[in-house]
Amino acid sequence: MLTEKGLWTRLRTRLIFTGPTLFAFATVMIIPFLYGIYLTFTNWDGIAIDQNFVGWDNYIGVFKDTVFWKSFGMTLEYVFITVVLTNAVAFLLAYAVTRGMKAQGWFRAGFFLPNLVGGIVLGFIWQFIFNQVLVFAGQKMNLTLFSTSWLADPDKAFWALIVVTVWQYAGYMMVIYIAGLMNVPKDVMEAASIDGASNRKMLARIVLPLMVPSFIVCIFLSLQRGFMVYDLNVSLTSGGPFKSTEMVSMHVYEQAFLARDYGLGQAEAFVLFILVAAITLLQVYFSKKLEVEA
Amino acid sequence: MMAGQSRILNWIKFSALIVVMILFVFPFVLLIVNSFKANQAITSDPLGLPNSVQFDNYVNAFDKMGYVSAFSNSLLITIAGVLLIALFAAMTAHYFVRHNSKVNQYLFFLMVAAMIIPFQAIMIPLVKIYGSLSLLDNKWSLIYMYIGFGSPLAVFIYHGFIKSIPLELEEAALMDGCGRVQTFFRIVLPVLLPTTVTISVLNVLWIWNDFLLPSLVLTSSEQRTLPLSTFYFYGTYTVDYGPLMAGLVLTLLPVLIVYLFAQKYIIQGVMQGAIK
């Protein structure tokens, strides 16, 4: 441990080293977070300088806001499907590109490509694909599935969001799974293969159990990103058709900044935070129990 | 026999992988191809190749998006944000590791715990507070906010790495009469370079592409970043596909060029960032 004499020198060193970070962290995250909790008990409209204290009214409002709960239910469904599909696709891709095949690096680079681009741009690209390219191809080849735009139909628009999400994040999670696969000890695999274990058996008995930490990270990341989806939602479907694909994050935004009900919007954001934090912490807690040592 | 069979099997696997790869890259190819076509050609045959290569769409989009201004705003915000986060977080993490007191442990835990708070839970009070201080619509406020939001993860990753650096190096430097700050810059910071690359990759991908935070902070059109100008350009121009496609390509282009050269570091950065 490095220790120094003199209170003043110690304080100065502390300020130089931790001052900027802690000040920014406190003023950008902690104070707004706490102030946000206070805001949930007020009826600020975004314009007035003052706001009135309204007690638990906003929280009662959250429970009465059926659109919020419908949005939340749909977001849950969206998160469940995208987490399962993204991680399944990502793991398969990672497994395929770590088997010593030719041009592995190129494949990895290609699958990762969508992650370089923000949700806004990706959403617009896919809007063009769903509205123009697929409709054109569907009509040419008489595929009724594509002959009308997916984005014009509530159910299909929901699935369009899922397709793009999986396409976007699979490459990112693949990279994390690759790191996990490369950490599976070679000697264990060799010993198993000498003992006559088949590829499939080794995958189920050795690789998958050792990959639990990677699964925890990837599922955590995809859960969080799924619940908080906003950019893609805005650019691909803008919540439509007829508000049928408005995810919960977009709903909170509209409640606060467009309907100008900041108290209710913040209360919904806070309820959302509690629910998401509970779900992700439970996920990490329970999956930690599956971890094994090599 | 066996070898022949497995070779065929390998070929099947390889071709399957190529098909998946085409699915992943095809949207970008379609976008680029269509960006050279006129609106009529795009809507009548979105899969067709352009008759002649013409740059009208690009000239049009470049102008209407305010590309130069949006690009320079994005570049300034990303570079300043990434460098400042790395510098401040490295110093803080170093201090936390080398002065492992109760207070510092508690502060470190607070930062790590705060990572679970989603941006949406903070955005409304954030806009209210900074709005009432008249600090909105300013690039430097945005950069400052990125430091606040980005430092927990950066401190966390640096913290894990600094713990593995032997103390002797620093002690020797201090013994030779270097000050704290000098020791940090001369001895510690260079050793942290691989971690700095990891953190910077994650932060570049985040800040360059971020939409929601800048859309709340930067309100006037001359302050817009690339994702913002793309969004507003798309919103006001929905009928004419040609310039839209060109605009999207223009937004993608800088990232693609960087990816071409730094692909290895980017993928490694994501790998390292997740392991810790």
Image (cartoon, grey):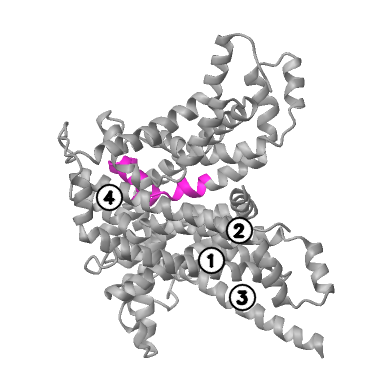
Q: Residue at x 62, y 24 (%)?
A: B99
Mark 3, residues whose alpha carbon is within 10 Å: few (<14), some, or many (≥20)? some
What secondary structure is found at the residue carrying circle 4? helix
Mark 3 and mark 1 residues within 8 Å of each other at the beta carbon:
no
* Residue type marked 1: Asn
Task: Residue under label 2, please give it.
Answer: A214
Task: Residue under label 1, please give it.
Answer: A87
Task: Residue under label 4, please give it.
Answer: A268
- Residue B204 drawn in magenta: yes
Does residue B56 show up?
no
Q: Residue at x 67, y 42 (%)?
A: B194
Mark 4, residues whose alpha carbon is within 10 Å: few (<14), some, or many (≥20)? many
Task: Residue under label 3, please give it.
Answer: B17
Does residue A181 show up?
yes
* Residue type marked 2: Ser
Stretch of the chain drawn in magenta:
B203-228
Direction right: furthest residue? A194
Mark 1 and mark 2 residues within 8 Å of each other at the beta carbon:
no
Q: Is residue A261 left or right of residue B57?
A: left
- Residue A15 drawn in magenta: no
Q: Is residue B200 left or right of residue A137?
A: right
Q: How far is disc 2 from disc 3 in space, using C-alphas?
A: 22 Å
* Residue type marked 4: Glu
Of pointers 4 and 2, the one earlier in the residue sequence: 2
Q: Residue at x 65, y 25 (%)?
A: B184
Mark 2, residues whose alpha carbon is within 10 Å: few (<14), some, or many (≥20)? many
* Residue type marked 3: Leu
Q: How far is disc 1 from disc 4 in space, using C-alphas?
A: 29 Å
